[in-house]
Amino acid sequence: MVNIRRSVLPTTDKGWQAYLQNVKATAGRQWIALGRGLVVCLEASGTKTFQARVRRHGDTNARRIVIGHFPASSVADARRALSEIKAIAKEGRDPALERRRAKAGITEVRILGDLVDTYLTRREGDLAPKSMQSEREQLHILRDAAGSLRFR
């Protein structure tokens, strides 16, 4: 890891934007703290990724979450996304899980039975009727056993 003197680094979002635009790739992976929990990871390939370490309420260990990639996301966009992620984590919800659900088109999953129904609805046209019937039977066993299990 290459150390950069703190006095060389910018202090404003506009300055960080210009710095990230001009910084060259290093030999290895390097993390630079932008402040208030926001970090940019500089890869040897030249990729620049905004990341944050977030700890949900009640968790003992923090997890690293990718916020966005530079230049597709600006420093200001990354800071806004970070504040939203921190608010979600403070409520005890998992920001990474909510992103995956949103990407999959699942707006709200309350219980396991709802998840099984959503999955079967999406798989309806993808499988042959006999395979679909077999999958439906197997998942209904799971649904009957633990269908009222709640998710956060």
Image (cartoon, helix red, strand yellow):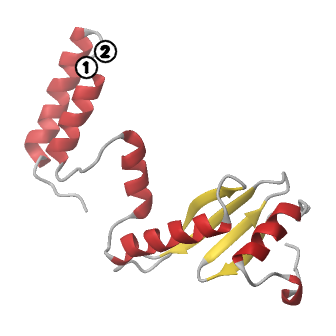
For mark 2, give the secondary structure: loop
Name which residue type carries label 1. Answer: Glu
Pointer 1: what residue? Answer: 124
Q: Residue 127, labelled with which disc?
A: 2
Residue 136, above or below 39: above
Name the quarter where the N terminus is drawn: bottom right
Q: Residue furthest front?
A: 14
In this orientation, does residue 91 appear? yes
Residue 123 placement (x, y as % from top left): 29, 24
Residue 109, above or below 17: above
Left or right relative to 33: residue 87 = left
Left or right relative to 29: residue 55 = left
Q: Quadrant of residue 25?
A: bottom right
Residue 65, above or below 3: above
Q: CA distance from mark 1 to mark 2?
A: 6 Å
- Which residue shows up at 16% across the image and 39% down it? 142
Residue 14 placement (x, y as % from top left): 74, 73
Name the quarter where the C terminus is drawn: bottom left
Is mark 1 in CB contact (under 8 Å) with mark 2? yes
- Which residue shows up at 80% across the image and 58% down it? 43
Q: Quadrant of residue 134?
A: top left
Residue 134, above or below 118: above
Query: Alpha-carbon neighbours of circle 2 within 10 Å: few (<14), some, or many (≥20)?
Result: few
Q: Residue 106, labelled with which disc?
A: none
In this orientation, does residue 56 appear? no
Residue 22 placement (x, y as % from top left): 88, 63
Q: Quadrant of residue 13?
A: bottom right
